[in-house]
Image (cartoon, grey):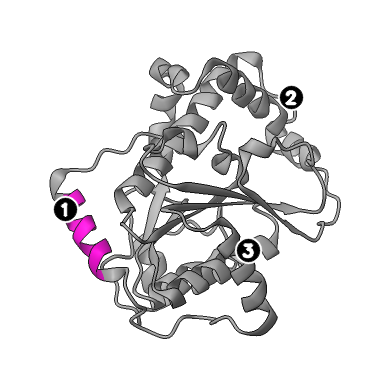
Amino acid sequence: MFKLIFTAVLATSLTACLTSCASKPEAPVLNQLTGSALDVTTSRVDAVLPANVLLLGEQHDAAEHQQIHQQVIALLAQRGVLAAVALEMADVGVTTAGLHPSSTEQQTRSALKWDNTGWPWEAYGPAVMTAVRAGVPVLGANQPRELMRASMGDRTLDSQLPGPALKAQQQLIRIGHCNLLPESQITPMTRIQIAKDISMANTLAKAALPGKVVVLLSGSGHTDRLLGVPQHLPASLKVKAVRLRAGDAALDDKAEAFDAVWQTPALPEKDYCADFKAQMAK
């Protein structure tokens, strides 16, 4: 969601690493797919490929969505076409590119400066480690928290989406915060969302390689073609956006917002607004 600026040295170094790391796996892929899992994942992935960029938009509390992350990454790694994995769950600038495929989970978490309070490692670790075991770099793509205040006041972000899309994004911010935010906060919070999308898009664009696939793991709002990361990617990249959806909620998705919707079993009902109200009260 924010603009990413790399120095020439870093860009050159990253490109070289991506080129050398994105061929065949250097180590056995973690949790290699077999049987029905392989069949389902192959069918899903083949339906959206070819692509330079594959966006997997999850519901953060749906464990099956993180399992799908791992399965897709394992399949692409097995095929030798995985260029990199970019994460909403880590800040831009961190990478596993310097790690050996045999690196430990602790070494990987350290390289990514992993925040386990916000993103439980047990949920995302399998996907990350599958890429590391395959010798594929994992890249932080999110805007660092310390830049968010600046984004909130950055008026240039208001022009990064077409007018109707900007209004739709603002409405999603209202709804996503249970209509509890003061109206004065809607525009600043929308700017943060847009800045995050821009940051992820810049990371993906720099990691793209001809004939390979860069995968983004993020919330589904970031993968929306009309509002999210795809709005900020170069037109030269072939992008496919997938929404992972638990149950049959939100069936009113616009068809053009995602290239595919992969449905998973419904989760137990939960009052998210009650939780948010409790947080607001603290």
**Relative vertical location of residue 130 with respect to residue 9 in this rendering, above or below:** below
> In the displayed structure, would residue 183 be above or below residue 51?
above
Separation (CA) of disc 3 from disc 1:
34 Å
- Rounded to the nearest angstrom, the CA distance separating label 2 from label 3 is 36 Å
> Where residue 212 sits: x, y (%)?
37, 61
Lower sequence index among marks 2 and 3: 3
Identify which residue is drawn at 33% across, 53% down. Answer: 208
**In this orientation, which residue lies closer to the viewer: 164 or 142?**
164
The disc label shown at residue 179, or none? 2
Residue 126: percent from the left, percent from the top?
Answer: 53, 72
Q: Amino acid at mark 2?
A: Asn
The image's mark for residue 12 is 1
Image-quadrant location for residue 185: top right
Q: Residue at 38% across / 33% down in the picture?
A: 147
Is residue 94 visible in the rendered structure shown here? Answer: yes
Q: Does the magenta portion include 209? A: no
- Amino acid type for the residue under numbered disc 3: Arg
At mark 3, the secondary structure is helix
Q: Position of residue 134 (x, y in %)?
A: 39, 76
User: Disc number at residue 140?
Assistant: none
Which residues are the magenta region? 10-20
- Tell me how far mark 2 sits from mark 1, CA to CA: 45 Å
Say which residue appears at 86% left-offset and 51% top-offset: 269
User: Can residue 143 be seen at all in this image of the molecule?
Assistant: no
Give the left or right position of residue 212, taking residue 268 as reference.
left
Residue tagged 3: 44
